[in-house]
Image (cartoon, coloured by chain):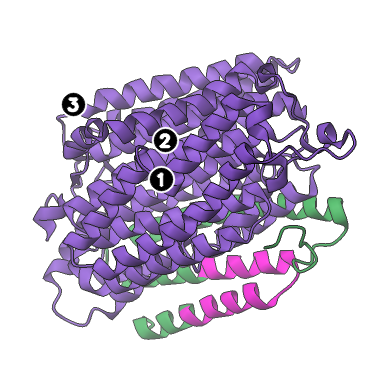
Chain colours: A green, B purple
Amino acid sequence: MIRLPYLLFFSAVLFSAGVYGVLARRNAVLVLMSIELMLNAVNVNLVAFNAYLRDAALTGQVFALFVITVAAAEVGIGLAIVILIYRNRETINVDEVNLLKW
Amino acid sequence: MLSVLGQVSGGPAVAHGKLLFRPIGPELILVGVALAVMLLDAGYPERHHATLALLSLAGLAAAAAYSLSLWSWTGPTTVLGGMVAADRFTVFFRLVILGVAALAVLLSYQYLERADEVRGEYYPLLLFATAGMTLITAAADLIVVFLALEVLSLSLYLLTGFSFRRLASAEASMKYFLLGAFSSAFFLYGIALAYGATGTTNLAGIAHGLTGQVGPLSLALAASGLLAVGFGFKVAAVPFHMWAPDAYQGAPTCVTAFMSAGTKVAAFAAFLRVFDVAFSPLIWDWKPFVWILAALTMVVGSVLAIAQSDVKRMLAYSSVAHAGFILVGVTAASHAGIQAAMFYLAVYPAMILGAFGVVMVVSGRGERGLTLSSYAGLARRSPLVAAVLALLLLSLAGIPPTAGFIAKVAVFTAAIQSGHWPLALVGVLASVVAAFFYLRVIVLMYMQEPVIAGGQREAETGFDAEPGAVGSLGFVAIAVPALLTLIFGVFPGILFGVLKSASIIRF
C-alpha cells in the first residue's frame, strides 16, 4: 500500500496545479478543465483517507462518487455557458469578457 | 462550549431499519412540483405562464405548510443515517427561504412578461434552487452540505444567464459559474481534510472527534480554513466577493432579488451549523480568521458601494457589506450571537429582496434605467414606490424604527458581550459610511427634479408616471417586504420569541 503522505502530497500538487491553471489561463475551457483537476485532487484525497482510516462505512469512496457526479453536472452547465458566450461574442477569453466591471 | 451553542447527539447515528423521510418533506415537495412544472411546460407548449407561476406558488406554500408542521417534530434529531437534522433552526430558515422564493415568483412573473422571456424552465430552476437552499439549512453531514450547495449553485448559474441574449447576463453567468465552481473545489478540499482529521463527514461526529483530539490539529485547522473560504465565497465575504457585483448586476433583476436574499440565508445557515457547532472545539483557531473576514467585508463593501453609479451594483456591494454584519454575529459564536445572526438573516432578505424588487419595477423593459440618475424625482412620478424604496433603504442603512436597526443592534451587542468590541466599532463606523449611499438615493428621489432630456425620459427609464404601470403583483412583492421590515422593527419581540427555541442547533 502506498503511504498516506505521498498520496496527500500528490493530491496537494494536483490541486495547486488546478489553482494555478484557473488563475493563469485565459481560455474559459482551460479554466474549466483546471477546476476539474482541483475536484479530482479532492477525490484522490477522499479515497486515500478512506483507505488509511479503513473506514467501514466507505464515506470517502461514496463521497468521491458524489463529487464525480456533481463534477459531470458542473461541466455540462459550464460548457453550455461557454458556448453561449462564444455565440454572443466569438471569444471565450475571460479577459475580453469584461462588460461588467467596477 | 458545546452545551451552550448546540446539542450534539452521540456520534453519527447510523439508524438501520426505519428511514424517516418526513424531515425532508419540504424538499421532496419542492422537487416534485419542479418536475411537475417542467412536464407541464413540455406537454403544453402553448404557454400558460400564469399556470406555471401559480403551480410554483402552490408548491412553495405546501412546502412552507409542511415545514411548519415540523416545528413540533418529536422524532430523532437526525434522520436518514445522521444526514439530515430535524430541528427548529431548520424550520425557521426554511420558512424564510420559502417566503423569499414566493416573493421572487411574483417578481419573476412580472419581469418575464415584460421582458418577453417567458420560458418554461425558469420556474423549475427557481424551485430546484429553493430546494437546495432549504436542504442546506437541514444538512447534518458535509455530504449533504456539499450536494445542497451544488444544487442551489448550479440552478443559480443558469438563472443568472437566463436572459442570454443580453450580453451582460451571459457574462454574469460565466463569471458566477467559474468563481462558484472554483470556490466549490476549495470547499471540497476542506471537507476531504475534515474527513481525514476525524474519520467522518458527519457534523456531530466531527465535533466529537475534535473534542477528544490531543495530537496536532493541522489537518482539522486546514480543513476549517478551507471550509471558511468556501463559505466566504458563497456569502460573498471580502476578499471572496469578486463575483457578487458582476453576477448581481448582470442577472435578470428578479433573479438578483432571489439570489441575493436566498443564497445568503442558506449559506449562513450552513455556516452557523458547521462553524458554531461542528467546529466549535476549534473556536479559538477559526475565530480570528472570521473576525478579519467580518471586518474587511463590512468596510470594503460599504466603501466600494459609494463609488457605484449603477443601482444594482450599489445594492450588490451593500449586500456584501451586510454579509459582514452577519459575520459579526457568527464571530460572536455565543447563543446571543447565533440569535442575532438569525434575526439579521430573517430581516435582511426582506430588505434586499424588496430593494431589488423596486429596482426591477423602476427599470424598464430590457434592464434600462438602472443608473442612479434615473431615480431623480421618483417621488413625484410614483410616490408609493418611492416611499417603499425609502423605507427599505432606511432599513438597510439601519435607522430606527426599522428592522435593520434592531438587527444591527442585536449583532453588535452580541459581539460586545463576547468581548469583540473592536469589531463592533468597525461595524458601527462601516454603517455610518454605508448610510451615505443609501441616503443619497433617498435625496435623489425626493429632492431632485426628474432628468428629462427632450422626451428621452421614457426611453431612459421606461417607467410611466401612473402607478398602474407597477403591476399589482410586483407591488405586492415590494410592499410585503417593506411592511415586514416595519413590523419587525417596531415589534422585534415577535421574532425574538420564535428565535428562543429556533436558535438551538441540534443534531
Where is residue B284, by image quadrant? bottom left
Q: Is residue A26 left or right of residue B323?
A: right
Say above or below: B393 vs B34: below
Q: Residue furthest right?
A: B454
Q: Tell me if I can see residue B121 in this picture.
A: no
Numbered label attached to residue B97? 2
Q: Is residue B379 visible?
A: yes
Give the residues in magenta.
Answer: A12-40
Identify the chain of the residue marked 1, using the numbered disc in the image: B
- The answer to whether B320 appears left or right of A57 in the picture is right
Q: Nearer the viewer, mark 3 or mark 2?
A: 2
Indicate which disc residue B72 carries. 3
Q: Are marks 1 and 3 on the same chain?
A: yes
On the rendered structure, is A35 left or right of B501? Answer: right
**Dot 3: what SS?**
helix
Earlier along the polypeptide chain: callout 2 or callout 1? 2
CB within 8 Å, label 1 to label 3: no
Residue at screen point 46% across, 42% down: B394
Task: Say if labels 3 and 2 share a chain.
Answer: yes
| Picture layout, residue A91 above or below residue B51 | below
In the rendered structure, which disc, 1 or 3, sits on the residue that comes first in sequence?
3
Q: Quadrant of the N terminus of chain B?
A: bottom left
At label 1, the amino acid type is Ala
Numbered tag placed on residue B266 in the rendering: 1
Residue B320 % position (x, y): 49, 56
In this picture, residue B348 sits left or right of residue B107: left
The type of residue carrying mark 2 is Ile
User: What amino acid is found at the position of numbered circle 3 in the picture?
Assistant: Ser
- Evaluate if marks 2 and 1 touch, with contact meaning CB atoms under 8 Å apart: yes
